Amino acid sequence: MDTTKKKRRIALGCEGSANKLGIGIIAHDPETNEPTVLSNVRHTFVSPPGTGFLPKDTAQHHRAFFVRVAKQALANAGVRPSELDCICYTRGPGMGAPLTSVAVAARTLALLWDKELVGVNHCVGHIEMGRAITGAANPVVLYVSGGNTQVIAYAEQRYRIFGEALDIAVGNCLDRFARTLEISNDPAPGYNIEQLAKKGGRVLLDLPYAVKGMDCSFSGILTRADELAAMMKAGGKGPDGETFTQADLCFSLQETVFAMLVEITERAMAHVGSNQVLIVGGVGCNERLQEMMGAMAAERGGSVYATDERFCIDNGIMIAHAGLLAYETGFKTPLEESTCTQRFRTDEVFVKWRK
């Protein structure tokens, strides 16, 4: 009788494409390939109210905190470096300087511990972690974050993009409007807009609704919202002749942009014949977006899948999981090819681990 037992495969993932530095450690069961989250540590660079996070400052933050976060991830997981199978890092897309800082650190760990290196597409990391956590089998994916807005469906070992933002991402639209209102960036500008929106709703202010086929445009909406914010500060009146508040502005912005996202997602569901929607990315934490998407899916006899902030917001565990899936098919990133790029489309990745 064969008494040998296959050992679990373990990966450490490093994420730093924007203002979140995340390091996570995941294990895959050798028999079922089921993932187990061993640790998921994150540290966020928070800029002052009314400002965004600059690449150079964000990169400096990631360099300053990388060792501390890595040690904490190993301690939380109870894993020694010798037990790791590979080191995974975000190859792109994202902000150049932060990506580079974390890529250099990941290379250092791979050399220090003599481990294979695996470069991961950030968007694919979100999708695979979302599928693993929620159990969604073959959903239409709405990927919404500060840097990306895409409607995606899987076909023939690629995540195909059916629609996307033509200019700025929906999360960037919300973040920049938070700057206009000079509200706090802690814990996140989008979260603070969401909380303000819950207090609004007395009036729905008219904002451009820019859906073009399967694609969306958010820059014109932001411009109009900024104009209305200036009117509000000057004591201007709303369409009902009454003054309006920050909360009314946040409510109106959310309702408009989320309605656009629901429309293009529903169109993609009809096109591919799916009744499942998986929402991933930082904006996917928004309860109002989940509620609106849920209402649409329910009308179609479908369902919505989403995760909480541990997995919606950028994190290292999603990079570890997607990287380990690729590693298990034989994929590795040679050291001399371990670059990073600000532009790395979701549909460029060959998804060998799916049929």
Image (cartoon, rainbow, N blue to C red):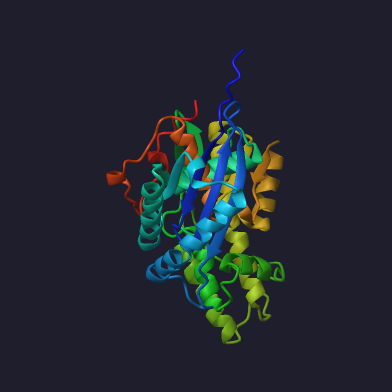
Instruction: Quarter of the image for the N terminus: give it.
Output: top right
Q: Is residue 129 left or right of residue 335?
A: right
The quadrant in which residue 97 appears is bottom left
Is 221 placed above or below 338 here? below
- Number of marks in the rendered image: 0
Q: Is residue 234 visible?
A: yes
Q: Position of residue 67 (x, y in %)?
A: 47, 61
Q: What residue occupies the far bottom of the structure in this picture?
A: 234
Q: Residue at x 61, y 46 (%)?
A: 38
Residue 345 horizontal/vertical position (percent): 39, 46
Q: Position of residue 292 (x, y in %)?
A: 67, 52
Is there any visible trace of residue 151 in the rendered image? Answer: no
Depth check: give the residue in front, 317 or 258: 317
Is residue 246 shown above or below 15?
below
Residue at position x 49%, y 46% from top? 81
Q: Residue at x 31, y 41 (%)?
A: 334
Left or right side of 35 for 301? right
Q: Residue furthest top?
A: 1
Quadrant in the picture for residue 128: top right
Relative to 84, say whether 155 is above or below.
above
Q: Position of residue 16 (x, y in %)?
A: 45, 57
Report the residue at 39% width, 67% height from top: 55
